[in-house]
Image: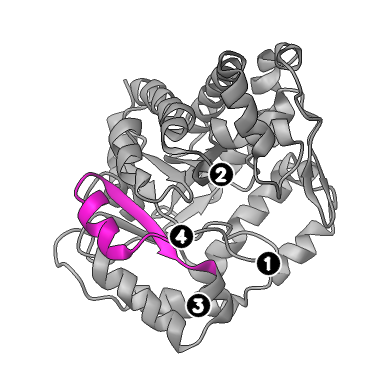
Amino acid sequence: MKNPNIIDQVKAKRLIQALRGQACARPPFWFMRQAGRYLPEYQQLRRQETDFLKFCYTPELAIEATMQPLRRFSPDAAILFSDILVIADALGSGVRFVEGQGPVLEPLRCEEDIARLTPERVEEHLAPVFETVRGITRALPADVALIGFAGAPWTVALYMIEGRGGTDGSRARQWAYRNPASFAKLIASLVDATIVYLDRQIDCGAEAIQLFDSWAGLLAAEEFMTWVAAPTAQIVEALSVRHPQVPIIGFPRGCGVLYADYAEMSGVDCVGCDSGVPVHWIHTQLQTRCAVQGNLDNQLLRVGGENLCAATDRILAALGEGPFVFNLGHGILPDTPPQHLELVVERILGYQGVTAGA
């Protein structure tokens, strides 16, 4: 059994309250990719290690990258600085990041390639990430929660089969149609690896978890339920047994009306929504089931101005009365002026909503 004092401390944090279904007088906020290239201090830090994956595996650098946005914006959560493809790297996909191209992997082409994956290496290979989590936990302000994360199985599988990003996922989708049995083996391997990875993150101090399913919207409805919602449910069930006090956010980007089915089937505590989902629909179809997170357009954040203020206010007005975490519909873009985030934060801090809660 967990130390009750630790659980009480976690309960006091605004983010955790919202993820557990409580409405807060001022919604908690953080931003996907809140640590990254848009920050001048991050660009300076990256000069110490130009290989991105090595940067992620160097705890002192990853800790500093995680902490940088906290000093600027005082969000209610820090999110571990890492990448969704470290699990693929641990499994033997030879992940590397090429300037101007993004991630490049040794692609899976047949069932024999799946058999050569190395799930037994996951915990040892990702030990630097766990050290990073421990270091962040020591450095965080008392009222800031730490979010650990992983790429969800479907999205990681897509990268492992395509061998790179920026595709329509056709190889992965065709494999799933032509040979669902072998594709299921890959997904099962990723489910198991993800459980191990997130379990250790929580052991090291993560207080909430987000599953990023960035390419969920590529799938047809039935395949979405099979390859996105069902594997997520397996991960949620396993982690909930081990760590019932740790809430889980699911982010199946681009899935449209299937967000409601995802919320029902996956068992996540909070659903993160992309910017294409109307806030009224989120309020009526999702927020009655679970906490919600999102969904400011990252392109609008980049542009700024009066429209940014108006959109921020609309989201707060629509969702701020229920369990809600203010965030973006996708990650911060590299050329976003940091001042635009300051403007959004100012609107959030000035929000006058429900009087109950934190």
Which residue does the numbered mark 2 point to in the structure image?
Answer: 215
- How crowded pointer 4 is (Cα within 10 Å; few <14, some 14-19, many 20+) is rated as many
Q: Residue furthest front?
A: 178
| Residue 296 among magenta residues | yes
Going from N to C along the chain, the mark reached first, 2 or 4, is: 4
What is the three-letter code of the residue carrying label 4? Trp
At mark 2, the secondary structure is loop
Do residues under tags 4 and 3 come within 8 Å of each other at their CB atoms? no
Q: Which residue is mark 3?
A: 342
Q: Tell me residue 216's x, y (percent).
A: 51, 42
Residue placed under numbered mark 1 in the picture: 334
Amino acid on which the number 3 mark rests in the picture = Glu
Q: Eyeballing the image, is 68 above or below 352?
A: above
Closer to the camera, 50 or 336?
336
> In which quadrant will I find the N terminus?
top left
> Which badge, 1 or 2, is on the more N-terminal residue?
2
Which-is-in-front pick, marks 1 and 2? 2
| Quarter the C terminus occupies | bottom left
Residues rendered magenta in the picture: 275-298
The structure residue drawn at horizontal position 40% and vertical position 21%, both measured from the top left corner, is 238
The residue that label 4 is drawn on is 30
CA separation in Å, label 3 and label 1: 16 Å
